[in-house]
Image (cartoon, helix red, strand yellow):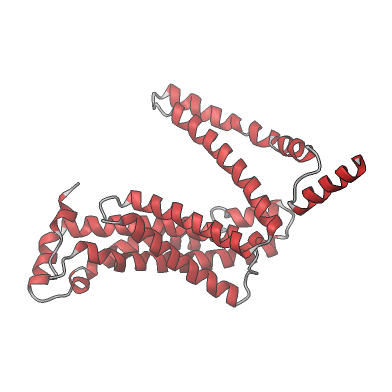
Amino acid sequence: MIMNMNKNMVDFQSQFHLPMDWDWLFEFLKGMVKPVAALAVVLIAVILSFMQNLGLEKEMVYSIFRAFLQLSVIGFVLQFIFNQDNTGWILLSYLFMVSVAGYTAGQRAKHVPRGKYVAGASILAGTALTMFVLVVLNVFPFTPRYIIPVAGMMVGNAMTVTGVTMKRLRDDIKIQLNLVETALALGATPRQATLEQVKRSLVIALSPVLDNAKTVGLISLPGAMTGLIMGGASPLEAIQLQIIVMNMLIGASTISSIMSTYLCWPAFFTKAYQLETKVFSSD
């Protein structure tokens, strides 16, 4: 009877990919020794903040504690998803990342009506289209181990670019209200009246991404490339992946930022092609 119980337990653990013992926890804690040791540099930052009366000590400690907690949790979650190798988990993870990114970008552009939804839709459009092209061209296989990290990089960059684009566009229109209103009075469409503001917001938002592409490898080695090299891959293999990463970041960021400008317009203008003054009245 005991043998049957043990067999049933093994079958249950195998079916749900559960560890047979607590060795996994020991290995995890053992692997955390070096990350904990690296807290020494954070301690230096805390001491310097205290000496300079910056008042950032609590924020630094909270930030690094939150990073430890979030990364530890996401590590276990990814391990579970990788073991499942299920398309549903890939899509669920991707939509979760887009939702958080949309909320964060919307917070940056808080004066844009329905900014969180605009940002989320823009990020979704840009990253989904880019990912679709990469999968169709067989650049990456559609598996959790590839798609989730790649999607995370694209969503993160698209989030930053989209937030800056939306905020800058709204602020530029507010600064040049008279110019925009004059163009509208002369018969210009909202797109024509705000063409220069749109161009300026897109250039400002996308410039860091393009500058990073122009200096990659000359000033610093990006995270994906560094991770591969430290993991034992050859530098030539690492640069091949990094080139792909830079391509997809530029593509996803550009699509998302342009999409956000189109989705912002309905909130900036009335149906009569007049400026929605309440959008630009707050600071």
Q: Which image quadrant is residue 133 in? A: bottom right
Question: Which is nearer the eye, 79 or 15?
Answer: 15
Question: Which is nearer the eye, 266 or 183?
Answer: 266
Location of residue 246 with respect to 28 vertically, above or below: below
Could you say where residue 188 lies in the image, as x and y percent from the top left?
14, 75
Q: Residue at x 37, y 64 (%)?
A: 257
Q: Could you tell whether 169 is left or right of 22 in the image?
A: left
Q: Residue at x 34, y 61 (%)?
A: 118
Q: How many marks are shown on the rendered structure?
A: 0
Could you say where residue 261 lies in the image, as x and y percent from the top left?
30, 66
Q: Residue at x 34, y 49 (%)?
A: 107
Residue 216 seen by the camera: no
Residue 209 seen by the camera: yes
The quadrant the N terminus occupies is: top right
Could you say where residue 179 lies in the image, as x and y percent from the top left?
12, 64
Q: Could you tell whether 203 is left or right of 153 in the image?
A: left
Q: Which image quadrant is residue 87 in? A: bottom right
Q: Which image quadrant is residue 49 in? A: top left
- Which residue lies most toward the front here? 1
Could you say where residue 219 lies in the image, as x and y percent from the top left?
53, 54
Location of residue 228 with respect to 193 vertically, above or below: above
